[in-house]
Amino acid sequence: MLDPLGSVEKGVKNVLYYYSVYIQLYKWNLYIFKKTRVSAKCLQCSYYW
């Protein structure tokens, strides 16, 4: 027999886990973006000129 409640609980836990990982990656990307935004602008300038 399938255990619908158990699988739902597992699914919810998986979603929450992936969501927390996604949040961490998002924060990390924002941090890196802020750090590298200046150098990215410099790269753009050298690219355009």
Image (spheres, grey):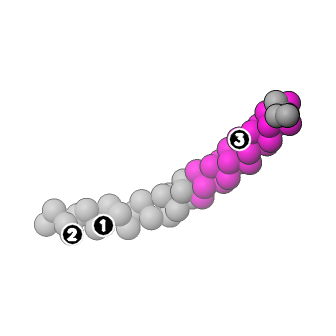
Q: Nearer the N terminus, badge 3 or badge 1?
A: 3
Hey, which quadrant is residue 3 in on the image?
A: top right
- In the rendered structure, which amino acid carries the disc numbered 3? Val
**Residue 49 in magenta stretch:** no
Residue 47 to residue 28: above or below: below
Identified at 35% across, 63% down, the residue is 40
Residue at the farthest top position: 4
- Range of magenta residues: 5-28
- In the rendered structure, which amino acid carries the disc numbered 1? Cys
Q: Which mark identifies residue 15? A: 3
Identified at 38% across, 67% down, the residue is 39
Which is in the foreground here, disc 2 or disc 3?
Answer: 3
Q: Which residue in the structure is indicated by mark 2? A: 46
Is residue 25 found left or right of 38 in the rendered image? right
Q: Main secondary structure of the magenta part?
A: helix
Residue 5 to residue 40: above or below: above
The residue carrying pointer 2 sits among few (fewer than 14), some (14 to 19) or many (20 or more) residues within 10 Å by Cα, namely few
The residue carrying pointer 1 sits among few (fewer than 14), some (14 to 19) or many (20 or more) residues within 10 Å by Cα, namely few
Q: Disc 2 vs disc 3: Cβ atoms closer than 8 Å?
A: no
Q: Which residue in the structure is indicated by mark 1? A: 42
Mark 3 and mark 1: span between their CA atoms?
A: 39 Å
Q: Disc 3 vs disc 1: Cβ atoms closer than 8 Å?
A: no
